[in-house]
Image: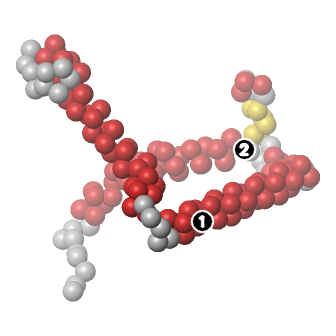
Amino acid sequence: MYPAKFKGKWLPLAFLSPTLLILVVFLYYPVIQTFILSTYRVAFLGLRKHFIGLGNFIELAHDPAYYHTLLVTAIITTAIVVVGMGISLAIALLANQPIKGAPIYHILLIWPYAISPAVAGVIFLFLFSPHFGTVDYLMSSVTGKSL
């Protein structure tokens, strides 16, 4: 099978442009602004800024409390991952045991995943109901026409 090819250079960019726009606005621009702001010493409430370059990073590298914070963060992260994976594995092994009433346990385990779409469906049913829905009411009050 041959890979798909576009017949122009602009069509792929047109398809990628919404994603690229979201990435630039919500990811790249804030990261760049954060780095730029980190090169300043900012007074209370941001009333004054003084450029100090990489001074904040150098000060941070010489602070023993920073390394202690990194160590505590690494320990907590590791503990949460290990404990979380261990509990998940234990529940999966228990759910896979051939015991009486196993289908009931399987239903109870999957219940949180199954209930969310159902609740969303009921909410949208109430929103868009032709007789008593909020969207229908707003649309009829604005346009004079019902759904």
The nearer-to-camera label among 2 and 1 is: 1
Compared across the picture, whether 122 is left or right of 115 comes to left
SS of the residue under disc 2: loop
Of 102 and 136, nearer the camera is 102
Amino acid type, mark 1: Ala
Q: Residue at x 82, y 51 (%)?
A: 69
N-terminal label among 2 and 1: 2
Label 2 crowd (10 A; few <14 / some 14-19 / many >=20): some
Amino acid type, mark 2: Ser
Q: CA distance from mark 2 to mark 1?
A: 44 Å
Q: Residue at x 75, y 55 (%)?
A: 76
Quadrant (top left, top right, bottom left, bottom right) of the C terminus: top left
- The location of residue 46, given as percent across then percent down, is 71, 27
Of 83 and 95, nearer the camera is 95
Up the image or down, 69 lies above or below 120; here it is below
Q: Which residue is mark 2?
A: 38
Of 118 and 79, nearer the camera is 118
Compared across the picture, whether 45 is left or right of 30 comes to right
Q: Which residue is mark 1?
A: 90
- The location of residue 70, given as percent across then percent down, is 80, 55
Q: Residue at x 64, y 65 (%)?
A: 86
Compared across the picture, whether 44 is left or right of 117 comes to right
Up the image or down, 144 lies above or below 68; here it is above
Marks 2 and 1 in Cβ contact (< 8 Å): no
SS of the residue under disc 1: helix
